[in-house]
Image (spheres, helix red, strand yellow):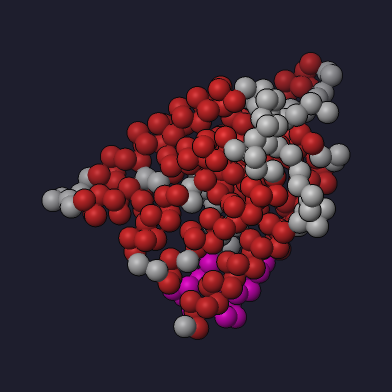
Amino acid sequence: MRQFTPGISSKAMNRETFKIILMGLMVLDHITFFISPYMADFFHIITRVVAVGFAYLVVEGLHYTHSRKDYLIRLCGWGIFMALGNYLMNLFVLRKQFAMSIFGDNIFLTLALGAAVIWLWDNQQQDVKKNRVLKILSIILLIIGSLPILEGSFIILPVMFITQLTHNSVKKRNLWYLALAIFMAVIELPAALSISNPTALMIFDGIAMNSSDMFFILIIPLLHFYNGKIGKCSAQLKYLFYIFYPLHLWLIHLIANFQ
């Protein structure tokens, strides 16, 4: 099978290493309860690569998987599991200030929706009419899904769609990522910078908290080192992210709740 992104096999970082780096950054983004606000701001900026990094891997995974149906069911299943876990944590354990969002703290659901968009678009239907209908449904789902309801959907879904459309060209992918980052900056920066008598720290805090989505563009240098290959421990680590993501969030909220 042809490599998802041609011409990157000489890079140093395999898929499992990439996932572990993303998971490490993900922890930094979620420990705001225990660090200073400005350190949290810094972490919030550099960790914008996490969601789009896993989004990239999902699009790539859909290219290689033997069953897109099973892949989508797995994402949905973990999404439902985490939503239930978040709900039960809020109901029986967590105080209000440490409560978790049922859908907002659940990247699985966003990735599942993005996977559905990609599957509909790249439907491989031979019938021209069916192919066109499914592509139209994909665009409709992309537009509706990009509303800020699920976690990061307004940036993750466009990134996944761009990744699918440009996977044959790193240059085109990076240019479209850059265009999306500029678009997000145009939308978000004015509100972040509308501060009376701002100081440098206030501006930094405003950008980090209110217009950080544009920093997803930092994924480009990270992808520069990614070779698209599976590692030696691929089978053993297949479900690492699925388990680590909910457990680390639940643990962080539990520690914050009882500290």
Image quadrant of residue 158?
A: top right
The x and y percentages for residue 225 are 59, 38
* Depth order, front residue of 192/12: 12
Could you tell me residue 147's position as x and y percent? 51, 42
Q: Residue furthest top?
A: 128
Residue in front for this viewpoint, 170 or 9: 9
The image position of residue 210, as x and y in percent, is 36, 49
Quadrant of the image containing the N terminus: top right
Residue 6 as seen in the image, left or right of residue 27:
right
Say whether residue 256 is magenta. no
Query: Left or right of 201: which side holds 236?
Result: right
Magenta stretch mostly in which secondary structure?
helix
Q: At 54% from the left edge and 71% from the top edge, which residue is drawn?
A: 252
Horizontal side of residue 25 vs 197, given as left or right: right
Q: Nearer the viewer, residue 60 or 210?
A: 60
Q: Which residues are magenta?
A: 83-100
Task: Please name the residue shown 63% across and 61% down the image.
Answer: 245
Q: Is residue 86 magenta?
A: yes
Note whether 14 is above or below 32 in the view shown. Answer: above
The percent position of residue 81, horizontal first and vertical second, equals 71, 63
